[in-house]
Each structure stands twice: as C-alpha cells, then as structure tokens.
Amino acid sequence: MKTKPTAPQNIDEYITGFPKDVQEILKKIRATIKKAAPGAEEAISYKMPTFNLKGQYLIYFAAYKKHIGLYPVPAGDPEFNKEVSAYKAGKGTLQFPLDKPIPYNLISKIVSVRAKEISGKATIKRKKA
C-alpha cells in the first residue's frame, strides 16, 4: 500500500527533495526572489515554495520533471509581455525548461513588478480605511 508523501514544511525541505542539479537552480531562484523583494516572507502553499509580501502572495515556484514553474505572471507593458511570451504555459504561468538556461534576470523583473502591484494595492487599501 502506498502512503502519501508528506508535504514539505519549508523551502529547504522542498529543495532537498530534488536532484542536486535542480537543487542548485531552486536555490538560485530563491536567492533571486529574496534579492528582488527583500521584505518578502517564505512559506509553503499548495506544497510549493511561496513568498508573501504584506499579507498577500507574491510568487510561487515549483520544480517538475522537465521544467520550473513560476506563478503568477503580472501583466506588463508590451515589451515585458514579449519577454515572458517565450515561457508562457497557461494563464498566469511560466515554464522554464530545465534543459535551457534559467532566465534569472527575468524572474527578478517579474518579482519586482509583482511587489509593485502588491504595494499599490496595499496603498489603495490604506487610503480607503
């Protein structure tokens, strides 16, 4: 009888569940997110590494057999949309193939845009209160 694998309790546990080469990619993605949004807090949500900012989810990432998934993708200007279009996999989802270089600079941009979106929402909420 199979038992369900236990969900990771933190991002370190999540990362150690993958082969060494994928672990290195995940660690670098984590560091990229931390640098782009220093105030973000780490969590696990839906069994995936998650970063939250000001009480809202900022970004999720997850490793799969052939790619790394990143969620959600913010809407940006046409140039930004063109840049992410090579990785679009679905509504609000990007997939970075493991057999190609991971675009860490793009991940940093995405996190920065998401952080600005969240900060804008937080500002609006404060003004209404």
Image (tube, rainbow, N blue to C red):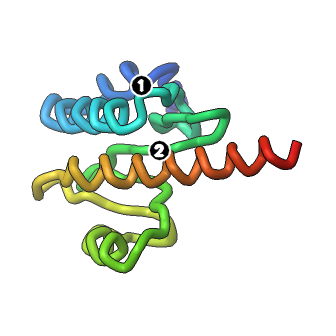
Q: Residue at x 62, y 51 (%)?
A: 120
Q: Residue at x 59, y 47 (%)?
A: 118
* Screen quadrant of the C terminus: top right
Q: In this view of the protein, which residue sits in the foreground, 64 or 90?
A: 90
Horizontal side, residue 20 vs residue 115: left or right:
left
* Image coords of residue 69 (percent x, y): 37, 53
Residue type at mark 1 is: Ile
66 shown above or below 125: below
Q: From mark 2 to mark 1, how far is it between C-alphas?
A: 11 Å
Residue for badge 2:
60
Residue type at mark 2 is: Tyr
Task: Find residue 77 and report its image quarter.
Answer: bottom left
* Image coords of residue 6 (percent x, y): 52, 25
Say whether disc 2 or disc 1 marks the residue closer to the N-terminus. 1
Q: In this view of the protein, which residue sits in the foreground, 126 or 111?
A: 126
CB within 8 Å, label 2 to label 1: no
| Disc assigned to residue 115 | none
Residue for badge 1:
11
Horizontal side, residue 124 vs residue 26: left or right:
right
